[in-house]
């Protein structure tokens, strides 16, 4: 794999992560527990989908085969998506959504902070913009998690259950594939394991305040970054892509 | 062929569709206008990654230029350096306030730097006895506040 192929793969992954998670969060539109929260979740989804557009447009340009953002979003099967498994998990109850967002945001923010200093001008530009948005996301998910954990017995139970269920998807975030290893060596992206310390610190600080218990390290699921997904992704894509698949080339 | 300054003046007509009192120049979205060998280049920058108003503002720029009889132009979108609320000029801040939206705190405000929220004045009555309702408001750029003095809810253009 040369550096250009690695860059394509990395930009595609950043786009896939943002698009899949953005779509999942958008499923709360009209269903969130309170009006303010409905607006908050749809705003967060919109930020992520906007970021996805920037990454996928760039990925298409790097690839050089004329694929546009929409081709990459709507005309790839789940095996060609290379997002992390945590982003595709169903939204579950609201505690589940908040825990997933929190575990992701705590990773996403230091990643973007580092990318905002990338030697690749375009990744740098996308990250500079996104990092400010994601700072709001992390604050929001942290505040909810503390409220749930340190709230009622029921909210605590639901938050802890979600944390125990989602924990196994966090290992994959720090597993660098070939593309990420090549780019880290060239200083284009940070080595993923270098983000672990800040992630740990954020997770431990918020969980302590939320009186939630950090699950023990154990078996970690992985595969999403290689295109091997849980069944949930194909179901999600079937819904997301149906219009473009039924009416190829249709425009809004 | 109009000059860059004249074209900037022309583009004053392009407003933010979500806050129609403020122009893209006042908002800081319009970065640069240049004229080289008869070709006009307009550089714009998005406020937020997912700002749905961006495509609209771009189309409005194109429409305004065409209407003025300018055919040879290019609208370029740049991400870097990233837009910040500090780029909203004084005129823009005054118009936001008149429109009922509290302008954003300056990011260099010492309280912001220390992680404390500077007090936000109610755009209706001016009281600083206000409270945050939600960090996320009706559009990506706003947070929702309420005023304890006059009891009115209001939007804050949040610091970015
Ligand atoms: Zn008031």
Image (spheres, rainbow, N blue to C red):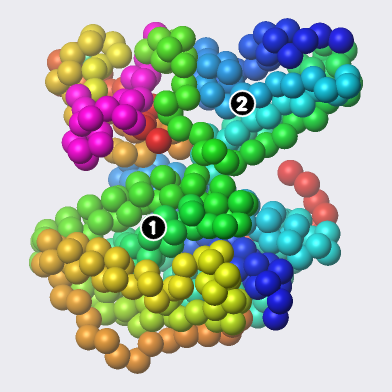
Instruction: Compare residues B60 and B151 and report the one nearer the observer.
Output: B60
* Numbered circle sitting on residue B26: none
Residue A55 visible in the shown view: yes
Task: Tell whether label 2 touches label 1 (CB within 8 Å).
Answer: no
Residue that label 2 marks: B31
Which residue is found at the position 31% from the left and 39% from the top? B135
**Magenta stretch, residue numbers:** B98-119
Give the dominant element type of the magenta stretch: helix, strand or loop. loop
Q: Nearer the viewer, residue B120 or B1?
A: B1
Does mark 1 have its CB less than 8 Å from ligand 1? no
For the C terminus of chain B, the quadrant is: top left
Answer yes or no: disc 2 within 8 Å of ligand 1: no
Q: Quadrant of residue B117?
A: top left
* Ligand 1 placement by image quarter: top left
**Nearer to us: label 1 or label 2:** 2
Going 38% across and 60% down the picture, which residue do you hit? Answer: A110
Chain name for mark 2? B
SS class of the residue under badge 1?
helix
Q: Is A212 above or below relative to A30?
A: below
Q: CA distance from mark 1 to mark 2?
A: 27 Å
| Location of residue B12 with respect to A86 vertically, above or below | above
Q: Could you say which quadrant of the image residue A113 lies in?
A: bottom left
Tag of residue A109 = 1
Q: Secondary structure at mark 2?
A: strand
Is residue A56 depicted above or below A204 in this figure?
above
Q: Position of residue A50 (x, y in %)?
A: 57, 48
Quarter-of-image position of residue B121: top left
For mark 1, name the chain.
A
Q: Are marks 1 and 2 on the same chain?
A: no
Q: Position of residue B133 (x, y in %)?
A: 25, 35
């Amino acid at each position: 794999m040369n550096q250009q192929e690695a860059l394509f793969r990395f930009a595609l992954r950043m786009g896939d992560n943002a698009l899949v998670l953005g779509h999942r969060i958008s499923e709360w539109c009209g269903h969130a527990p309170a009006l303010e929260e409905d607006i908050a979740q749809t705003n967060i989804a919109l930020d992520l989908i906007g970021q996805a557009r920037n990454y996928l447009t760039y990925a298409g340009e790097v690839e050089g085969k004329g694929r546009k953002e929409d081709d990459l979003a709507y005309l790839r099967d789940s095996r060609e998506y290379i997002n992390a498994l945590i982003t595709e998990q169903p939204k579950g109850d609201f505690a589940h959504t908040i825990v997933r967002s929190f575990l992701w945001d705590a990773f996403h923010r230091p990643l973007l902070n580092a990318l905002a200093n990338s030697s690749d001008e375009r990744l740098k530009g996308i990250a500079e913009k996104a990092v400010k948005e994601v700072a709001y996301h992390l604050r929001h998910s942290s505040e909810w998690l503390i409220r749930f954990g340190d709230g009622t017995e029921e909210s605590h139970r639901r938050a802890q259950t979600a944390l125990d269920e989602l924990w196994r998807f966090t290992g994959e975030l720090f597993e660098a594939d070939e593309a990420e290893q090549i780019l880290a060596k060239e200083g284009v992206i940070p080595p993923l394991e270098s983000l672990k310390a800040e992630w740990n610190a954020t997770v431990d600080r918020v969980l302590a305040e939320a009186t939630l218990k950090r699950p023990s390290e154990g078996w970690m699921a992985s595969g999403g970054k290689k295109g091997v997904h849980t069944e949930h992704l194909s179901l999600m894509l079937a819904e997301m892509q149906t219009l473009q698949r039924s009416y190829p080339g249709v425009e809004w | 062929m109009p000059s860059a300054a004249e074209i900037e003046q022309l583009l004053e007509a392009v407003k933010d569709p979500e806050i129609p009192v403020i122009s893209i120049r006042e908002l800081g979205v319009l970065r640069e206008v240049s004229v080289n060998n008869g070709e006009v280049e307009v550089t714009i920058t998005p406020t937020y990654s997912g700002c749905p108003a961006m495509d609209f503002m771009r189309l409005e720029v194109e429409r305004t230029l065409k209407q003025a009889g300018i055919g040879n132009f290019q609208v370029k979108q740049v991400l870097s350096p990233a837009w910040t609320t500090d780029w909203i000029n004084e005129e823009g801040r005054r118009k936001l306030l008149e429109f009922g939206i509290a302008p954003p705190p300056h990011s260099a405000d010492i309280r912001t730097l220390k992680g404390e929220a500077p007090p936000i004045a109610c755009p209706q009555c001016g009281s600083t006895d206000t409270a945050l309702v939600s960090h996320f408001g009706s559009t990506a750029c706003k947070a929702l506040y309420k005023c304890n003095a006059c009891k009115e809810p209001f939007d804050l253009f949040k610091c970015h």
